Image: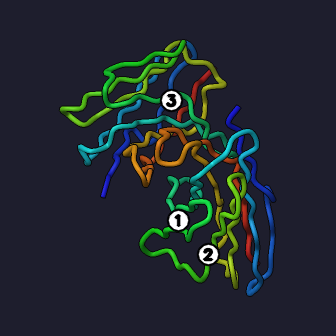
Amino acid sequence: GENVEQHPSTLSVQEGDSAVIKCTYSDSASNYFPWYKQELGKGPQLIIDIRSNVGEKKDQRIAVTLNKTAKHFSLHITETQPEDSAVYFCAASIRGGYQKVTFGTGTKLQVIP
Amino acid sequence: GAVVSQHPSWVICKSGTSVKIECRSLDFQATTMFWYRQFPKQSLMLMATSNEGSKATYEQGVEKDKFLINHASLTLSTLTVTSAHPEDSSFYICSASPGGGLSYEQYFGPGTRLTVT
């Protein structure tokens, strides 16, 4: 089955700096890569996603890149703010009749004011 | 749009009793719903996938008779933890996918904190 690795497990940045979280996946059939933000005691919230036919996607301060050949994808947050502090999960899935999402291990991001 | 609710948000029960958790898609129809379990400071682990009107598909290692899943309608799925024990204490999260397997996105509920005493 699919295996998703995520690094780093914790990340502290100063407010205004950029944060980068990296993930690798194992199943070359995976074609959808969402990123989720989870605040304490809440469910994950989809913040951005990318499909296998796209190499990069940006939404305001958040961007995601995908390298299918190397099987890795990354989340980039620019101009970080204290409210960006949360746990971020990458995930990989295969669009199809049985859509199963495999999550990475999570990155706890702390933005220091 | 794409709002998923869970009820209750937290529950405390005694060992040996059963607990039911509801997951509802509020503004879309969800052919497929998923149930996850999350331990503190850990990632989400998929427990089972439920499709409306059919039996749930459980992940390896998840006891079907202990975690009963019912997907009675396109907007409601329930998870019943039967004969709960302290080791079942966890954060249970559901998600719903509009369009089932034809859709990429999953939208998550806020989670249910279960504590078994």
Q: Nearer the viewer, mark 1 or mark 3?
A: 1
Residue B81 placement: quadrant: bottom right
Residue in the image at 53% along x and 61% along y? B49
Where is the C terminus of chain B found, in terms of image quarters? bottom right
Q: Is residue A58 above or below residue B105?
A: above
Is mark 1 in CB contact (under 8 Å) with mark 3? no
Is mark 3 in CB contact (under 8 Å) with mark 2? no
Residue B47's tag is 1
Crowdedness near tag 1: few (<14), some (14–19) or many (≥20) residues, C-alpha within 10 Å: many
Type of amino acid under label 2: Phe
The answer to whether marks 3 and 2 sit on the same chain is no
Type of amino acid under label 3: Ser
Coordinates of residue A84 in the picture (x, y in percent): 60, 26
Label whose residue precedes the other's in the sequence (1 or 2): 1
Residue B51 lies left or right of residue A103; in this view the side is right
CA gap, disc 3 and disc 2: 38 Å
Crowdedness near tag 3: few (<14), some (14–19) or many (≥20) residues, C-alpha within 10 Å: few
Residue A51 placement: quadrant: top left
- Residue found at the far front of this picture: B53
Residue in the image at 56% along x and 71% along y? B55
Q: Which residue is mark 3?
A: A12
A11 and B113: which is toward the camera:
B113
Is mark 1 in CB contact (under 8 Å) with mark 2? yes
Residue in the image at 59% along x and 55% along y? B33
Label 3 lies in what chain? A
> What is the image's colouring?
rainbow
Label 2, secondary structure: give it.
strand
Label 2 lies in what chain? B
Coordinates of residue A6 in the picture (x, y in percent): 37, 42
Q: Which residue is mark 2?
A: B67
